[in-house]
Amino acid sequence: MNASEIRIKDKVKEYFSKDGGRSAQAHRQVLLASLAKIITIVCSLLIIPLTKDYLNPSRYGIWLTLSSIISWIAYFDFGLGNGFRNKFAEAKARNDLQLAREYVSTTYFAVGAVSLLALLLTLTANVWIDWTSILKVDPALKEELRRVFAILCAFFCLNMTVSIFTTLLIADQRNGVASWINAIGQILSLCVILIMTRVSKGSLTNLALYFSGVPCVVVLIVSIFSYLGTRYHIYRPSIRHIRLPLIKDIMSLGIHFFLISLCLLVIFQMMNIVISREIGPEAVTEFNISYKYFNVLYAVLLIVITPFWSAFTDAYTQKDFAWMGETTRKLERICIFFSAIGLLMLAAAPVIYRLWVGDDVPIAPTTSTAVLLYVITQMFGNVYMYLINGIGAIRIQLCIYLFMAIIAWPLMILSCRCWGVAGIVVAPSLACLLQALSGRIQLYRIISGKAKGWWLK
């Protein structure tokens, strides 16, 4: 081994060992997650033209709108997932493995019960809902949309429970492993959709069954084997480790996450419905293609920031404020760098769209510009949100999202009517901007020891 190779090896070793175990673990997981996320992003980008051609732009817009509505179910776990994430990380930081296992078993029980109730309620409501009227589409699709809704509901509710394992991995600062599980699900989904385009005609029912079912089954299988034969055997859920009083413990923080989730539902998940009603399902396709393109930036950023949620829980529990401050400044610089890349992506957008999805879905330059600005505010807002979530001081964040949830629907309708598809991002961009500004002030107050009152709640 020559001198140059030795220096490179030493640099790599230094990167993964500096700042102690917490940063080293985060660095390793970022690298592992990066490899998985590249695969996930490529698969998701390939799936879009396949499904668009499999259905057609109009039916694809219907699919996007309906599937986004079903994803609302995930918001109704009453914050148990995020509450569990923080409580498990705190138990691990204190080396209380018995309590950590009780949190796992109790969360499975609680989320499983909520998922079952949600499934029964949504399936009952589905009997009476006319989706063609809500989405303003062809009435001939009434029964098919009802069937698609039922399939998506079933798998989303099942996924709420089985995905506790990936939440456990993230809480254990192993989001890289969780990312690979998701990547495997995406690869298999891509393969199945590719086969469907060869052997069947465009069917919303088949797409719902395989697109939502395959990733869910992958997580279920991996979690079963992991609890039986890996290091996570010690956390294997069991009835005898269910502690009902812990539900209140999880919910004490989780209820705030739940309320925030409801606000996020109104602010961010209503966009497809507003576009479909105000402009048409084809416009939903235009918006989502542009968003998928620029959202690559945010998806990559999530790889970086995800392990720091639980790392900040650990650091705050141990009062390591110096590390927290240094990490925050690094993540801010990464956001600025990603924003610069976004400008290059904007310049290349027309060419990329043409190569990616063809010319049958025209995307206006104003749509691309608006979506990029939205993604940039989303990146900055979520960096501070993730770090503050790890600390658990989310009261101010809740107030901001409550305010935005009240004005989001009329603001989206007004801005969409004024500026078309580009106007739909005004409300969510404003929400992210307010979160970024307040989050930065709050986080630095906490790190410097100046936070009091609501800044710590």
Image (cartoon, rainbow, N blue to C red):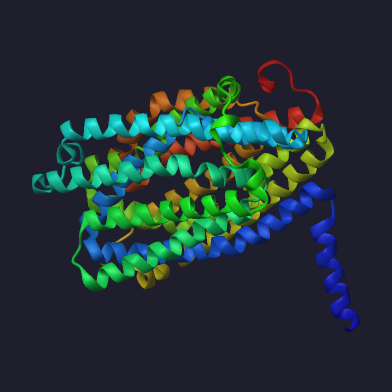
Describe residue 254's horizontal placement relative to residue 113 as left or right. right
For the view shown, which residue lies furthest in the top direction? 453
Point out the image quarter for the C terminus.
top right
Residue 452 locus on image (x, y percent): 73, 18
Tally the numbered discs: 0
Query: In the rendered image of this protein, does residue 303 appear above or below residue 454?
Result: below
Residue 298 higher or lower than 186, as above or below: above
The answer to whether 215 appears left or right of 107 in the picture is left
**Residue at 58% in and 60% down:** 341
- Foreground residue among 241 and 29: 241
Task: Give the quadrant of the N terminus.
Answer: bottom right
Q: Position of residue 96 (x, y in %)?
A: 74, 33
Q: Nearer the viewer, residue 180 or 443?
A: 180
Q: Position of residue 126 (x, y in %)?
A: 21, 35
Q: Is residue 70 left or right of residue 307?
A: left
Q: Relative to 410, is 102 on the left or the right?
A: right
| Image quarter of residue 123 | top left
Q: Residue furthest right?
A: 3
Is residue 419 visible in the rendered image? The answer is no
Residue at 89% in and 84% down: 2
Q: Is residue 403 visible?
A: yes
x and y, in percent, of residue 406 in the image? 40, 23
Residue, x 81% and y 41% (percent of image)? 323
Which residue is outermost to the bottom? 2
Can you name the residue that lies furthest to the left here? 140
Residue 4 placement: quadrant: bottom right
- Give the residue at x 22% y 72%: 199
